[in-house]
Amino acid sequence: MKWVSNALYQGERTLLQLPLLERGKHYRLITDFTCQPQDSVLIKMEFYERSGKLIGTCVLDGKGGDVTYPMDAYFYSISLINMGMRELNFRKIKLIHASKGTETA
């Protein structure tokens, strides 16, 4: 499963799937799901420049973690990575400002 913050409406006819983030700011990604076996999902965030070139990757355990949005990033994606998972009960993923604890989505 993958979500992208830069949906090109003209080409894909979809709305934004993720909130826009501020460059250089710190965020906390919090997950709300269960999986079997336990700890069999990783979270991958990828950061891209305007041209679509990948400029950074951050892999977090299934509980989430802290990330800093790169200064030269234009958009990003969040993916769930299957590490032998047989069952997933997905509820939500939240991104909050790490310094303030306020939600962005």
Image: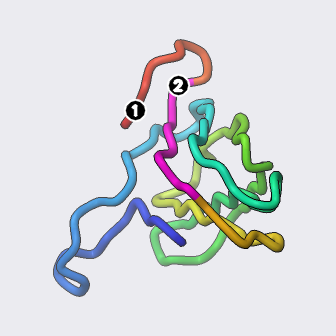
Near-viewer residue (32 or 21): 32
Q: Any magenta on residue 90?
A: yes
| Left or right: 61 in relation to 102 | right
Q: Which secondary structure type mostly characterizes the magenta part of the structure?
A: strand
Near-viewer residue (42 or 89): 89
| Location of residue 77 in the rendering, given as x and y in whole percent from the top left corner | 53, 63
| Location of residue 46 in the rendering, given as x and y in whole percent from the top left corner | 63, 63
- Residue located beneath label 2 in the image: 97
Q: Tell me the SS state at disc 1.
A: loop
> Please, is residue 56 above or below residue 10 in the view?
above
- Mark 1: amino acid: Thr
Q: Are marks 1 and 2 in contact (CB under 8 Å)?
A: yes
The boundaries of the magenta stretch are 89-97
State the CA–CA distance, disc 1 to disc 2: 7 Å
- Mark 1 burial class by Cα count in 10 Å: few <14, some 14-19, many 20+: few
Which residue lies at the image location 22% right of the left edge and 64% below the top edge? 15
Near-viewer residue (30 or 26): 30
Q: Tell me the SS state at disc 2.
A: strand
| Location of residue 99 in the rendering, given as x and y in whole percent from the top left corner | 60, 16
- Mark 2: amino acid: His
| Left or right: 12 in relation to 77 | left
Which residue lies at the image location 70% right of the left edge and 41% below the top edge? 64
> Please, is residue 14 above or below residue 24 in the view?
below
> Please, is residue 101 above or below residue 2 in the view?
above
Residue lying furthest top? 100
- Residue located beneath label 1 in the image: 104
Which residue lies at the image location 69% right of the left edge and 56% below the top edge? 35
Residue 4 lies in quadrant: bottom left
Q: Which mark is residue 84?
A: none
